[in-house]
Image (spheres, rainbow, N blue to C red):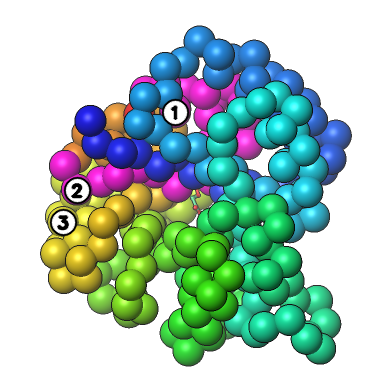
Amino acid sequence: MKKLFIVANWKSHKTTKEIEDWFEKFHSGIKSIELMDKSIIICPPQTLLSKTKQLIEKYQLTYSIGSQNVSPFDEGAYTGEISAKQIKEFANYTIIGHSERRTYFHEDYEMLSKKVSQAKACGVTPIFCIQGKSTTLPSGIEIVAFEPVDAIGTGNPDTPEDAERVAGEVKVSHNTPYILYGGSVTGDNVHSFTEQPSINGVLVGSASLDPQEFLEIISNA
Ligand code: PGA
């Protein structure tokens, strides 16, 4: 059976109380789902990394935590930044190169490469987002998420055929073991992506905010 990563990207959503409620509902629903080769990675906002870790321990879940961002610098005088070494206390993964970071925070390839180097040096695995086949990819990335900009948060996902075509090409051209698809993934459409031979999972934004919907995605993937 193919390994699948199901990644929740909560973006700038949720407070402590809200994630307590999310985990309580999620935990009671997940018991009845057979996970098989599905790895679940929760990417909360940075303020909730610690609380997410506590809740995962409290409910004895086997999920991983991902950060939504990482500093391009080592520890030091970088006000407001969170270094990979600090992330590593809570998370084993980090999202890098999301189109929202590229657009709103002007993160270019040079900066993204530094983030990748910092993450790897601290044992944090990058989930590197590409927006298309032509997005430059640093070498040695194990997990790529293909997220066409038009599909993010719009309710208009890419077609599974197009996502498969891009995933297949990137897998071959960059020797990338795992390619995820992201952009308007729901419980209803997830399987049409995960059944594609080159797609190893999904990166889910809006639909991961609701525990019930995220459970459906995991179950149907
Ligand atoms: P969406 O976001 O699922 O809300 O489209 C996906 C993402 O931005 O990773």
Residue 209 on the magenta span: yes
In the image, taking residue 66 as reference, residue 52 lies left or right, namely right
Residue 150 on the magenta span: no
Q: Nearer the viewer, residue 48 or 187?
A: 48
Which residue is disc 2 drawn over? Answer: 198
* SS at mark 3 in the image: helix
What's under tag 3, amino acid-wise? Gly
The magenta-colored residue range is 197-220
Disc 1 to disc 2, how far (Cα)? 19 Å
In the image, taking residue 122 as reference, residue 5 lies left or right, namely left
Which residue is disc 1 drawn over? Answer: 217
What's under tag 1, amino acid-wise? Ile
Residue located at (60% from left, 47% from top): 65
Residue located at (68% from left, 63% from top): 87
Residue 181: image location, x then y, percent? 34, 49
In the image, taking residue 125 as reference, residue 221 lies left or right, namely left
Eyeballing the image, is 53 above or below 172? above
Which residue is disc 3 drawn over? Answer: 168
Eyeballing the image, is 29 above or below 89? above
Residue located at (20% from left, 66% from top): 175
Image marks 2 and 3: residues in contact by CB distance under 8 Å: yes
What's under tag 2, amino acid-wise? Ser
